[in-house]
Amino acid sequence: MKSTHDSPILVTGAAGAIGAIGRNLAAMLLAKGHNVRALVRREDERADALRRLGAEVVQGDLTDLASMHRAIWRPRSTPPRWRAITASRPL
């Protein structure tokens, strides 16, 4: 599905090893037409599945500052505009 939203949403824990919450969230956002950047700890079949859904997959770790910078600041001509999802501010 082609995105109708420009700003990417970074989903951490997107491979969903425990509970699959990140994976399910990424799938739901993609189905609604959002651009999703999925942070995964390693390249494996779960990362491939996220790509097949349409997510941009970035390998990294929340405890590694350099990998988080790579996940947030991908090469582009302008800085990214990120959106936050909260209970009081729905999609």
Image: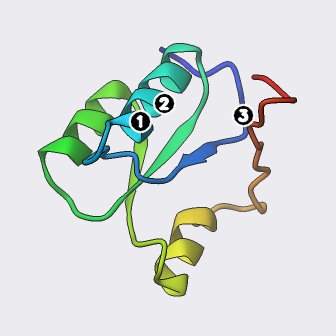
Q: Is residue 52 visible?
A: yes
The C terminus lies in which quarter of the figure? top right
Q: In the rendered image, which residue does mark 3 sit on?
A: 6
1 and 2 marks in contact (CB < 8 Å):
yes
Kind of element beneath mark 3 = loop
Q: Residue at x 59, y 76 (%)?
A: 69
Going by the numbered disc 1, the residue's amino acid type is: Ile
Q: Residue furthest right?
A: 88
Residue 15, horizontal then vertical, whole percent: 30, 46
Residue situated in front as seen by the camera: 65 or 36? 65
Q: In the rendered image, which residue does mark 2 sit on?
A: 25
Residue situated in front as seen by the camera: 23 or 78? 23
Kind of element beneath mark 1 = helix
Q: Classify residue 48 as left or right of residue 90.
A: left
3 and 1 marks in contact (CB < 8 Å):
no
Residue 82, horizontal then vertical, whole percent: 76, 49
Going by the numbered disc 3, the residue's amino acid type is: Asp
Kind of element beneath mark 2 = helix
N-terminal of the pair, mark 3 or mark 1, is: 3
